[in-house]
């Protein structure tokens, strides 16, 4: 009886690896009028921890500036997860680490950002979804 090795893709652990919030001009910034310009940057990273286990991190940085370039707040969250990937072809592993895992992590990072900014006394920032597949394709084309 031959035993087919079944592919394994599972979430072992989700956690906030790093979180920071800066409100450099508090309390005066709360008295200022005007709509801030909000900039969001997203980066992903992955590393193999041991055979079959990978850590994937999505880092989201949100900066809000007023028109005079004064920073209202800067919030950065690194949301990580440990994922188990076994019996999966190498090419598919790359795709899972670059697209599927960040898709799982991003909503947690988005919630952490929104919650932290609200706790800092600002209206919540609702971040648009990210197309990690497009980001992966761009990085593949850049490396080609």
Image: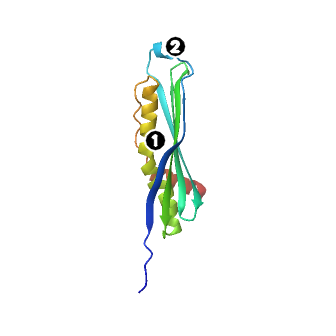
- The C terminus sits in image quarter: bottom right
How many callouts does the rendering have? 2
* Quadrant position of the N terminus in the picture: bottom left
Residue at image location 49% in from the left, 36% down from the top: 40
Please say whether residue 92 is visible from this viewpoint. Answer: no
* Disc 1: which residue: 109
SS state under label 2: helix
Q: Residue 52: percent from the left, percent from the top?
A: 53, 64
Residue at 52%, 66% in the rendered image: 91
Disc 2 and disc 1: Cα gap in Å?
28 Å
Instruction: Tell me the crowding category of disc 1: few under 14, some 14 to 19, or many 20 or more residues within 10 angstroms, Cα based.
Output: many
Which one is nearer the viewer's eye here, 40 or 137?
A: 40
The picture places residue 18, in percent across and down from the top left corner, at: 55, 40
Q: Name the foreground residue: 69 vs 62.
A: 62
- Which residue occupies the foreground of this view, 63 or 12? 12
Q: Relative to 106, is 1 above or below? A: below
Residue 123, label in figure: none
Label 2, on which residue?
28
Among the 4 quarters of the image, the one containing residue 34: top left
Few, some or many C-alpha atoms within 10 Å of disc 2 (few <14, some 14-19, many ≥20)?
A: few
Q: Earlier in the sequence, mark 2 or mark 1?
A: 2
Residue 99 or residue 58, whichever sits in front: 58
Residue that appears at 39% across and 34% down: 126
- Considering the numbered disc 1 on the image, is that residue within a helix, a strand or a loop? helix
- Image coloring type: rainbow
């Amino acid at each position: 009886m031959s035993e087919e090795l079944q592919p394994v893709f599972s979430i072992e652990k989700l956690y906030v690896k790093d979180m920071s919030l800066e409100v450099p001009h508090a309390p005066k910034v709360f008295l200022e009028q005007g709509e801030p310009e909000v900039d969001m940057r997203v980066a992903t990273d992955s590393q193999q921890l041991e055979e079959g286990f990978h850590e994937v991190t999505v880092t989201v940085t949100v900066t809000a500036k007023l028109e005079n370039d004064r920073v209202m707040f800067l919030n950065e969250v690194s949301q990580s997860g440990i994922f188990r990937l076994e019996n999966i072809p190498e090419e598919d592993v790359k795709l899972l680490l670059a697209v599927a895992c960040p898709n799982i992590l991003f909503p947690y990072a988005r919630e952490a950002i929104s919650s932290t900014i609200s706790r800092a006394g600002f209206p919540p920032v609702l971040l648009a979804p990210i197309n990690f597949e497009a980001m992966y394709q761009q990085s593949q084309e850049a490396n080609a």
